[in-house]
Image (cartoon, rainbow, N blue to C red):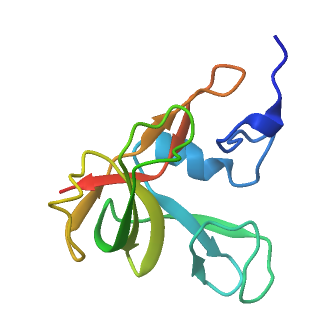
Amino acid sequence: MTYFRATDPFPLESADHTKLHEFYARLGQGTLATTKCAGCGTAAWPPRGFCPECGADTFDWVELSAEGTVHAFTVQETGLPAGFEGPRVFAIVKVDGHRVFSILVDADPVKLAVGQKVRLAPLRVADDPKGNARWLPAFRPA
């Protein structure tokens, strides 16, 4: 069977496909990280291959907290991509001054509230065509 990358709904996380593969490797180990410019020191979210402030393309990886607070959220009940169970809760989570767009797992939409504490819970999605694990940032109520 031929694998068509154009139909793959998940990111290509390996070093062969992205300069930011370290983000996914760390996420798979349970750590949320982002890039910090080696030139001017600006930390960016999402992680970037170049600095939005000074344009430098050298950076260091910095670990972010595993805890955050819900800044906003929405619930999607229909039209979910194949493989995702509904309802799905999407949220903007404040983590160390950054706003992280994420999925909330194990979250009851009726009990969820802005300002609620959440904890990092990386979500494993379909493996890549070579069988390597792939991850998306996700949080669960603390």
**Residue situated in front as seen by the camera: 100 or 17:** 100
Query: Looking at the image, which residue sits at the far top?
Result: 1
Give percent across and percent down for residue 138.
40, 51
Q: Residue furthest front?
A: 78
User: Dividing the image into 4 quarters, which one contains the N terminus?
Assistant: top right
The quadrant in which residue 41 appears is: bottom right
Q: Quadrant of the C terminus?
A: bottom left
- Identified at 45% across, 57% down, the residue is 32
Taking the image as shown, residue 36 lies to the left or right of residue 67, namely: right
Q: Horizontal and vertical percent for residue 141?
A: 21, 56
**Residue 25 % position (x, y):** 56, 42
Q: On screen, 121 above or below 8?
A: below
Q: Is residue 5 above or below residue 121?
A: above
**Is 109 on the left or on the right of 55, as rendered?**
left
Residue depicted at 76% across the width and 49% down the height: 18
Horizontal side, residue 82 vs residue 107: left or right: right
Q: Nearer the viewer, residue 116 or 52?
A: 116
Q: Quadrant of residue 113?
A: bottom left
* Residue 61: quadrant of the picture: bottom right
Residue 120 picture location, percent across and down: 33, 53
The one nearer the camera, 98 or 6, is 6
Residue at 24 percent of width and 57 percent of height: 109
Count of numbered marks: 0
Of all residues, the one furthest to the left in this rendering is 111
Q: Is residue 69 above or below residue 18?
A: below
